[in-house]
Image (tube, coloured by chain):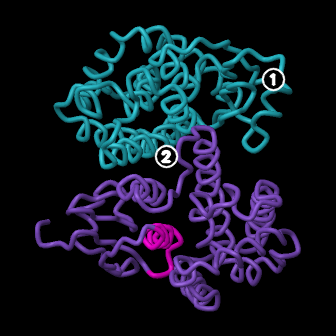
Chain colours: A purple, B cyan
Amino acid sequence: MADLPEVVLLDFWVSPFGQRCRIALAEKGVAYEYREQDLLGNKGELLLRSNPVHKKIPVLLHSGRPVCESLVIVQYIDEAWPDAAPILPRNDPYARAQARFWADYIDKKIFDCQTRLWKFKGDAQEQAKKDMIEVLKTLEAELADKPYFGGDNFGFVDIALVPFTSWFLSYEKLGGFSVEKYCPKIVAWSKLCKKRDSVAKVLTDPEKVFEFVQLLQSKFGAK
Amino acid sequence: MADLPEVVLLDFWVSPFGQRCRIALAEKGVAYEYREQDLLGNKGELLLRSNPVHKKIPVLLHSGRPVCESLVIVQYIDEAWPDAAPILPRNDPYARAQARFWADYIDKKIFDCQTRLWKFKGDAQEQAKKDMIEVLKTLEAELADKPYFGGDNFGFVDIALVPFTSWFLSYEKLGGFSVEKYCPKIVAWSKLCKKRDSVAKVLTDPEKVFEFVQLLQSKFGAK
């Protein structure tokens, strides 16, 4: 892969997982080449060669070497470019463990609920809505009155969650509920995050996300 | 939680996730109090209070503060007791990312295939067997001719996978296949790992695991 630029991101515009990596790269001030992938059509040869196990974006290529899985990539970015502000708290193993726990919670819960919300109808969709509200309320309780999940500094859990806030409008339209009613602190936190250039330049317009969700429904949803 | 010993592990004897933590603590030479939990009956108050989100073992309590989710715990152990041999490679972000990727792969794939193997019958069990063989072959290819997954030193991926080797006999009995036939390198690696005290003292006798699997089948399996 000698013909590649130093840092390349294989990604897909609306992916919350890819957006995590873009935010982390922006926070660290790392220049990179963005390469949009055709996920709904044919996956490219570089993607398949770089992530033969999962065949998924995002993939970060650094000096030609691939790193896969978004939370692994964000931690890699934090460790490979250590001079900029830390993403995971330095020198505090307990705070680092808490950050990893909550990022893992987001990974295990949000995308699953979100997929069930657009993919299913009827009782299964109703269950997805209930589950999503529970997950968001759990995150609301963890955030509590802190500005960011880790405290005073924007960090790992914020990066893990904030791309999903662009999907909140879709959750509301699909589920018929108000995220802000259940989770006012999460909504206030998302507005604070969006004041950062690293976040504002990366997140998708919620209306565009909903158009994409409708495309997903027409292709893969319950009829 | 002022009445607790310095380090406590809430665990369940046959859990591969709990065994990861026990191996990591042994590798670091950390003394701790082991507290067996009654998972099939009533979950204890300390477990529910320490892991209100998932309500699962293992939970590590260090100075009364809980850490949950086995891979988060193992990384915490590595960082909280940094003087002993490292579990994740130090000062090599790329090697650390690779280790996290493969541990995550094991987490996402093995337990799911294993559960479907004992829980289902007929076509669904046959699919679980095919998937499990594919997962093990993927790990075989990643191990290749290295002594350990990370190279010359026992580390994070080894700790993530080795407890599952006690379940191989159950996979073979349930699926009617030989792990060694498909994955001779994984079987040789597992024997090398078991030469370590930290592993040998923690892993469950495969026959006892199979008895436990039969108990699970009688309680929760397909009739």
Looking at the figure, which quarter contains the C terminus of chain B? top right
Q: Is residue B53 visible?
A: yes
| A184 left or right, relative to A216 | right
Q: Which residues are magenta?
A: A13-27
Q: Which residue is mark 2?
A: B108
**Lateral position of residue B130 relative to residue B115, left or right:** left
Q: Earlier in the sequence, mark 2 or mark 1?
A: 1
Q: Amino acid at mark 2?
A: Lys
By secondary structure, the bulk of the magenta-drawn segment is best described as helix
The chain that hosts pointer 1 is B
**Camera-nearest residue between A15 and B222:** A15
**Residue at disc 2, secondary structure:** helix
Look at the picture and state if B139 lies above or below A81: above
Q: Quadrant of the N terminus of chain B?
A: top right
Q: CA distance from mark 2 to mark 1?
A: 27 Å
Looking at the picture, tell me which residue is in the foreground, A139 or A76: A76
Q: Which residue is mark 1?
A: B41
Q: x%, y% of residue B164?
A: 45, 26
Q: Residue at x 65, y 26 (%)?
A: B216
Q: Is residue A59 left or right of residue A100?
A: left
Determine whether label 2 and label 1 are within 8 Å by CB.
Answer: no
Give the secondary structure at mark 1. loop
Identify which amino acid the numbered label 1 is placed on.
Gly
